[in-house]
Each structure stands twice: as C-alpha cells, then as structure tokens.
Image (spheres, rainbow, N blue to C red):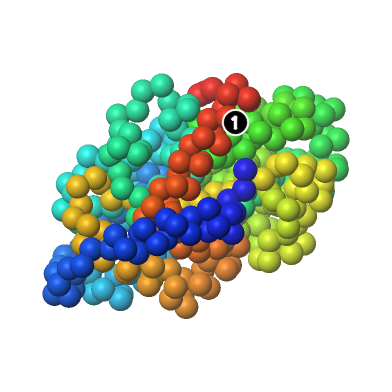
Amino acid sequence: MQFSKEGIQRRSMLQWAAATTAMPLVPAWAQASWPAKPVNMVVPFPAGGGTDAFARPLSAIFSKQTGKQLIIDNRGGAGGTLGAGIAAKAAPDGYNYFMGAVHHTIAPSMYPKLDYDLERDLVPLILVAAVPQVLVVNPKKVPANNMKEFLDYVKKNPGRLNYGSAGGGTSHHLAGELFKLQTQTFITHIPYRGAGPALQDLISGNVDMMFDGLGSSAAHIKGGRIKALMVSGTKRNPAFPDVPCSSEVGLPDYTVSTWYGIWAPKGVASDIQARAVEEIRKACQADDAKAVWAAQGADFPNLTGTQFDAFIKTELRKWSQVVKASGAKLD
C-alpha cells in the first residue's frame, strides 16, 4: 500500500503532457495579482498532528515569499471529514484551500454519508508530502524492544494492548486493521479527533501504541518519549536508519504511507489554480522546507493536476479493498 513516486510517474507521462498543454495562457498581470490578500487553508485535524507538521512550515514559507499570510484553519473531527466538508463549501474565489491527506481517500469507504464528494466538489492541485507509517509504542507500557518481542507479546496477550488513531477511517486506523490482518493478532482501536491528541495520549501512557505518519512522530521518537519499532515498506528511512522496515521483520506486504495534498473548492479560476500551484511548489522546494521534510523522513512528490487526480483514484480503489478485506468499521 506504499506510495510509489516512480510508479505514478511512469503511468502518468501522457498526463504530464496533457497537463502541460492544458496550462492556461493568461496575461502575466492576471496571475501576478494573486494573492492580493491573506489566503485561508483548512487543515481538517487539530493542531499538532501530521498534517500540521507540513502545513505550518509551508504556511510560513508561502507567507514570506508572497508577502500575504497563508492562514491555517484547523477544523478537526470525524476523521478529517468535517473539515473537508467545510472546505468543499468554501467560496471558490481563489483564497480558500484545503490540505487533506490519505485519510480522505479512505473516508468514502468508511462513512456511509458524507456531505461532500472528494472528486466532485474539490479540485486536486498538488501532492506536497509523503511519509511512511511507523509503529510507535509507549516504552513504559509496552514490554518490547524490537518487533519480535512485540509480536510475541501481542500474540500471547490478545486484546491487552490498544492503539490510538486520528479517528475512525483514517490511515492510522486502517494501518492498524491491516497489521491485525497480516499478523493474525488483536489490538483494540481507540479513535481520537486527530493525530495530535492521540500522540499526546500515547506519550502520557493513556494508549499503548499507534500507527502514525513518521512526520508527526519524528520529534517524539528522537526525544525518547515514544519508541519506533518498525517503518512500513521495503527500505529503512534515512531519517531513522536504526529502525527496521516491515519487510525486514517478516511483513513484506505491510506497506502503508501517509501523504498530504492540497485541493481547491470546485469553481476556482484555472489561472488562479495554476498560480497557487506555482507558489506552493516554490515553497516546498525552498531550503527551509527541504530541511523540515528531510527531518521528518518525507519526500516531496510534486504531483500536480491530472497526475495528482490519477493518484487519488488509485488510492480510493486501494483503500476500498482494505476496508472490505478487514471488515473495518467506525468505532
């Protein structure tokens, strides 16, 4: 289930060409006039979560380079779908955007009724970050120093451990369900209103473990407040070279990544969309952003327009299959 930049690029060469030829030819002054005032971006989780770990630095860099503030509007709840619904109904005036995540391609399979349609009501602009999932535990609550010890303990004590998530239907939740499927173990899911509150309860010991995006856990792992036992995928992450990957610990098919992208409400003028993508891409490629991304073990995929749209469709199909196979339900 891991995001593969190379795979998407190979499948999307024709889409690159189409996107390039479809770029609007507008007068330079029309694009240059944006932004003429502060820009609002809904982040559909509470402050302190994985989305914030990229949204906040991006906001600071964007604000500096354009001279207009990019305001982060945290709207947590319902696994990120509350904020998505708010963003989908925002005025399409070029000053309202939405920073969503992998969770939003899971939600249609988990929530029977959403007050928005990801593909109909929001326009994908750019994929800004992708990080592997990491299995983290509270070292005082979980008596394991490595994955072998952890799996032995979980199998001998079914249901004793619980894991926090950013909410029902998020990648944190589904990563846990996939883990249970592949290891034939049972751990109890505890949903929160965002990764930030879940992480704080993990650190304090109110929950035992978490399947988190590496970006939001990175600082806490480095600070020793939580212990990383495994990153998903087929290779170790350069930011945490001592943490084994899932294929090394006998879980070659456990590949889950958390990615973050930016959408606009449907109806934003195409020239403004192009200008927004240009400024966001420039911010993500700034030295300050590169340092933040690297520290969190993240890549900048730089997928835009039709490429990003194709990736979203692939993720919607993938997570629908995981939900069906696992029988995952909202808690």
In percent of width and height, residue 199 lies at 56, 46
On screen, residue 306 versus residue 331, left or right, reads: left
Q: Is 196 in front, or is 54? A: 54
Q: Nearer the viewer, residue 4 or 70?
A: 4
The residue at the point 23 percent across, 52 percent down is 96
Picture layout, residue 36 above or below residue 306: below
Give percent across and percent down for residue 93. Answer: 16, 53
- Name the amino acid, label 1: Val
Which residue carries the number 1 mark? 322
Residue plotted at (41% across, 21% down)? 112
Q: Residue at x 30, y 44 (%)?
A: 122
- The quarter of the rendered structure image containing the N terminus is top right
Across and down, in percent, residue 311 comes to: 48, 48
Place residue 295 in its image quadrant. bottom right
Q: Report the number of numbered marks.
A: 1
Q: Which residue is drawn at 69% across and 51% down?
A: 233
Residue 241 located left or right of residue 48: right
- Residue 172, compared with residue 326, is above or below; it is below
